[in-house]
Amino acid sequence: MKWAVIGASTIAKEWMISAIRATGGEVAMLMSSDKSRAERFAREASIESHSTDIREICESKVISAVYISTTNELHHPHAMACLNAGKHVLCEKPLAMTLSGAAEMVRTAEQKGLSFGTNHHLRHAGTHRAIRKAIHEGQIGKPLSVRVNHAVFLPPHLQGWRINNAAAGGGVALDITVHDADTLRFLLGENPEEVVAMTQRGGMSSHDLEDGIMGIFRFPSGVTAQFHDAFTVKFAGTSLEVHGTEGSIIAQDVMTQKPIGNVLVRTAGGDMSLSIDRQNLYEHAVTDFHTAVRTGCPTNASGEDGLWSLASGLAAAESAKTGSTRKISIG
Ligand code: NDP
């Protein structure tokens, strides 16, 4: 399958181009808004052609799929142009700046019979697949609560629009909380119904953007899930714990892009380490997308999953802004 990559981005360079190639795809074109950046990026990534005009992708007879990793405000226009041209779309999170924009993308893909995926990599991690299986097998009884520690340090080369450009979709809620929400939905098998949160400006972000957030999602089963997301925490590492009536799952280093981390199940019988598949998360995600295009089955991280994570991230930000608990719904 021939792909176009829209966005001369870090995630494309560091993870996604190699993931597409490793799973049998070919990256045929790179698009950037800037000609010299397009040229340099394409040369360094050995991509045969580049463009600053999305029409070249839309009109191409050979490109059947696009991966979109521009800044957040551009996901919607880029995805809509490609979907209307009949291309399958794998889009970065958050799908759009508004729920209605994201819903339009998902609806258009459905109407046109195209595959549409949200690049929520964490549900493709062996660690999270193992945690999900343990929960669904009843190893910890009935889940009661979850704690997600996803407060990290934003590396200097990414300290740009995320911390200083609200119009581009900056801020920690749209960047990290959306991943937490998707991971929680994946692990628990239910949708969050409400959230309460407080944000922080911890010295990295500027203007009106937050660089830290703490909050609690509540799920219909009664599970409460506490989350802490930040760009400013240098040394903590990440973790996730699920506590149930019969035991706890304790996972270290699992809110990450790398296939690392360990998962322990602790019950009255003692501690048991789960065996983990160490496949590259992004390769797992692109393999799934290729399968979806080939078979017409939904992607594992679908458009609807992207709608739920966006709704959750927006509701968390709104809760912090208004000082009130916010309901979560995709309309
Ligand atoms: P980057 O900041 O690296 O790239 C975003 C855009 O910035 C590019 O598309 C590019 O625009 C522009 N850009 C790149 N370099 C420069 C420069 N030197 N000067 C001016 N503009 C520049 O973003 P990320 O790769 O970190 O994130 C991109 C998207 O991917 C976001 O939506 C983010 O949320 C998502 N993401 C998802 C992850 C996941 O695991 N699912 C992980 C990381 C990010 P142009 O294309 O026009 O050249």
Image: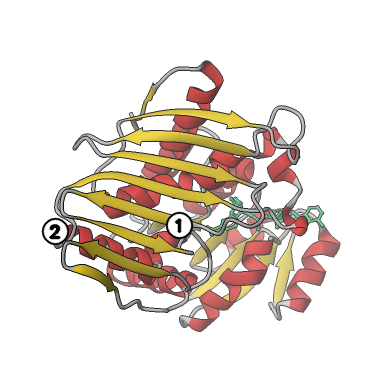
Dot 2, how many residues are within 10 Å of its Cα: few (below 14), some (14-19), or many (20+)?
Answer: some
Q: Which amino acid, by three-letter code, is at mark 2? A: Gly
Do labels 1 and 2 touch, CB within 8 Å?
A: no
Vertical side of 274 occupied by 114: above or below: above
**Measured from the top left, where is residue 63 in percent x and y?**
54, 69
Q: Using residue 139 as the reference point, say whether residue 217 is left or right of it.
A: right
State whether residue 331 is above or below residue 52.
above
Residue found at x 67% / y 55%? 234
In the image, 49 versus 123, the foreground residue is: 123
The structure residue drawn at horizontal position 21% and vertical position 35%, both measured from the top left corner, is 222
Residue position marked by numbered label 1 in the rendering: 239
Residue 21, given in percent of the width and then of the height, sits at 54, 80
Q: Secondary structure at mark 1?
A: strand
> In the figure, is residue 89 to the left or right of 53?
left
Image location (x, y in percent) of residue 64? 48, 67
Residue at coordinates 42% horizontally, 79% vertically from top-left? 278
Say the numbered circle drawn on residue 138: 2
**Residue placed most toward the observer, 40 or 55:** 40
Q: Residue furthest right?
A: 36
